[in-house]
Amino acid sequence: MSEFQYYEFQAIDRPLTRPEMAELRKYSTRALYLGWLVRLQSGELEDDDVEPPVPAGLGQLSGALQAMAEFLRIDDELLQVAAERSVTPESPKINRPDIVRKVRALPSAVKDEALADYFMGRATRLTTLQQRVRQDRPFAPGNDDKAGKTVSEIRRAAGLS
């Protein structure tokens, strides 16, 4: 390993700072959703499959995520249709006591299911709860599955069918 390679490795092999972790978390759900759009576009999904929760900020991609969408060759119209249900990124004005109060108000079964899914490697319910708490939207059990569009609805709206 050359000296340059050693220092290059050292630069990337370090713990992430809190702001870097927050940025990564912010991107992760949008990047995962872009991956789901690739599957939709390539025909891997069934027409009656329902989209996952639409992440906040999908309509306002950063340069890195825009480059990712272009690299993955996601149709612009498809991305635009998918972003219609995306809310603007949540405001950092919410404080911890408000979050604690809102989380305590959630039904225990909903929190338990979201955490169990998270521990199994599926964070979609937890992400949905996070968005609802931060956006101060009420939680109605069973609404999450009905809220998403089907693959055929998205394809039709984007002119892909």
Image: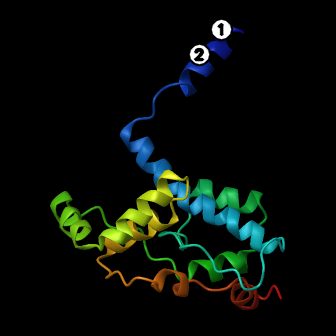
Q: Nearer the viewer, residue 105 or 82?
A: 105
Q: In this view, does 23 lie above or below 59?
A: above
Q: Total of numbered circles in the picture?
A: 2
Q: Within 10 Å of the Cα at label 1, are there few (<14), some (14-19), or many (20+) other Cα atoms?
A: few
Establish if 13 lies above or below 113: above
**Where's residue 55, x and y in %?**
51, 69
Drawn side of residue 31 relative to residue 26, left or right: right
Corner quadrant of residue 115: bottom left
| Label 2 CA crowd tier, 10 Å (few <14, some 14–19, many 20+) | few
Q: Is residue 5 left or right of residue 118?
A: right
Label 2 and label 1: CA atoms lie apart by 6 Å
> At numbered mark 2, what does the secondary structure look like: helix, strand or loop?
helix
Q: Is residue 110 visible?
A: yes
Q: Residue at x 53, y 69 (%)?
A: 60
Residue under the point 53% across and 73% down = 53
The residue wearing badge 2 is 7
Amino acid type at image mark 1? Glu
- Percent across and percent down for residue 8 are 62, 21
Judging by the rendered image, the residue that carries numbered circle 1 is 3
Residue under the point 52% across and 65% down: 124
CB contact under 8 Å: marks 2 and 1: yes
